[in-house]
Amino acid sequence: MTNDPIKLHALGITHFRAGRFADAAQAFAEAYAAAEMAGDRQKAAEALNDLGVARRELAEWVQAEAVLEKAYAMFAELGNAKGKAQAMGNMGSVLEGQARYDEAADAYKQSAKMFEEIGDSDSAMYAWQALSRLRVKQGAWLPAIAAYEEGIENLPDRSLKKGLLKRILSLPGYLLRGR
C-alpha cells in the first residue's frame, strides 16, 4: 500500500463515487495520516473534509461532526476560506441527517455567505439550494422560496443563470394574475 496522501485521497474518491463509503472513509483516514506525516496540512484538511462526508454517508454522525469540526479548524488555520465554507456546508448536511434542522439551516447560511465573500457564487448557490431543500423538507414553503431567492440575488447581475432563475420564480405570480 502507498503512503502518498494524493494517491490515497484519489482512492477514497474512487470508492466514494462507487458507493463504497466504508472503503472511502478508510482511504480518506489514511490520506489524512499520510498528509500529516508529510507535513502537508492543506492535503490533511481536504482529506478530513472528505472523511466527514464519507462518515455522513455511513450515518456515523458523531464521527462525521468531529472530523468536519477539525477540518474547519484546519482550514481556518491555513487561511483557506473556500475550505472553511465547504466544511461548513458539509456540516450542514451532517446536522440535517440528524434532524437538527435549525442548526443545519444556520450552517448552510454560513456556508453560503462564506462562499459569497470569496466570490464563489456557484458554490454559494448550492448552499442556498441545500437550505431551500431543507425548508421544503420541513414544509416551510415561504422560507424555502426566500432561501432560493437569496441565492439568486447574490449571483452576478449579468449572469444568464440569474436571469433564467428569476424568470422561473416569477412565473407562478404571472400565471396567477392571468396574463
Image: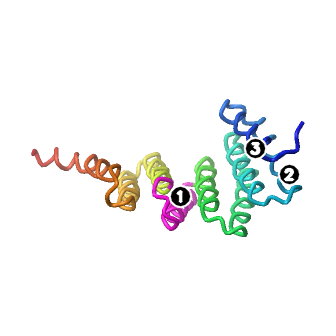
- Position above or below: 97 against 143: above
- Position above or below: 93 against 26: below
What amino acid is found at the position of numbered circle 2 in the picture?
A: Ala
Residue 55's image quarter? top right
Name the residue nearer the viewer: 25 or 81.
81
Instruction: Please state the horizontal and vertical placement of residue 81, each as a whole percent of the image.
Output: 61, 65
What amino acid is found at the position of numbered circle 1 in the picture?
A: Tyr
* Mark 3 residue element: helix
What amino acid is found at the position of numbered circle 3 in the picture?
A: His
What's the CA distance linking mark 3 and mark 2? 11 Å
Side of 177 where 153 appears, left or right: right
Which quarter shows the C terminus?
top left
The residue under label 1 is 108
Highlighted magenta segment, given as a residue range:
101-123
Side of 166 where 10 appears, left or right: right
The residue under label 2 is 33
Q: Outermost residue, left direction?
A: 179
Instruction: Please state the horizontal and vertical placement of residue 176, each as a whole percent of the image.
Output: 16, 46
Way the structure is coloured: rainbow
Name the residue nearer the viewer: 109 or 49.
49
The residue under label 3 is 9
Residue 158 is tagged as none
Residue drawn 44% across the image and 51% down it = 132
- Position above or below: 135 against 21: below
Instruction: Please state the horizontal and vertical placement of residue 124, each as a whole percent of the image.
Output: 48, 57
